[in-house]
Image (spheres, helix red, strand yellow):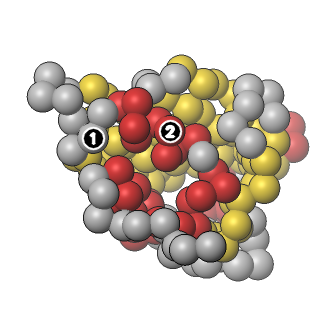
Amino acid sequence: MRTFEAVARIEASPDDVWALLTDVGSWRDWNSGVDRVEGRITLGEPITVYATMIRNRPFSATVTEIRPREAMRWRGGLPGGLAVIERTYSLDAQEDGGTVLTVREVHSGPLAGLLGRSTPDLNPSFRQFCAGLKAKAEGRISRPST
């Protein structure tokens, strides 16, 4: 099993963070690590992320859990559970109105070790994602002009 994780304290409400997190069409506006995202955040629907880090291997998954303002989970991998990739985005509301965002991905299954050898360390990419979302939610990134 291999795990990647990043955590960020965001000075914005879970509502604001959730709105940005689930608007995958705008991820490129605040995260230079994403080329594009295909799909929508809809339970049971497929979603594919094309990252700048691994251009030749997009991450395709199915949205398996949505708890608005709390958590979202995606599941992908190889058929038959030979390798399972589960990515979770968790929001933890803070008493002062802020939010703690955790992005976590776990690789498991019989072929997870083999898959892991061809997968780079995703921690820097996840930290970049969290930092970009934090900056956008806290108002430090403006939308590109159209």
In screen coordinates, is 95 left or right of 126?
Answer: left
User: Of residues 29 and 62, which is closer to you in this image?
Assistant: 29
**Circle 1: is it few (<14), some (14-19), or many (20+) Cα within 10 Å?**
many
Q: Is residue 58 above or below residue 9?
A: below
Numbered mark located on residue 110 in the image: none
Residue 117 left/right relative to 127: right
Q: Secondary structure at mark 1?
A: loop
Question: Residue 102 lies in what quarter of the image?
Answer: top left
Q: Quadrant of residue 99?
A: top left
Q: Position of residue 12 (x, y in %)?
A: 27, 41
N-term-proximal mark, 2 vs 1: 1
Quadrant that contains the C terminus: bottom right
The answer for how far apart the CA atoms under marks 2 and 1 are is 11 Å
The residue drawn where x is 60% and y is 46% is 23
The residue furthest right is: 79
Helix or strand or loop: what does disc 2 sit on?
A: helix
Q: Is residue 92 left or right of residue 54?
A: left
| Residue at image point 61% right, 78% down | 52
* Residue 131 seen in render: no
The tag on residue 12 is: 1
Q: Residue type at mark 1? A: Ala
Q: Position of residue 42 (x, y in %)?
A: 73, 31
Q: Which mark is residue 19?
A: 2
Residue at the left extreme of this rendering: 96
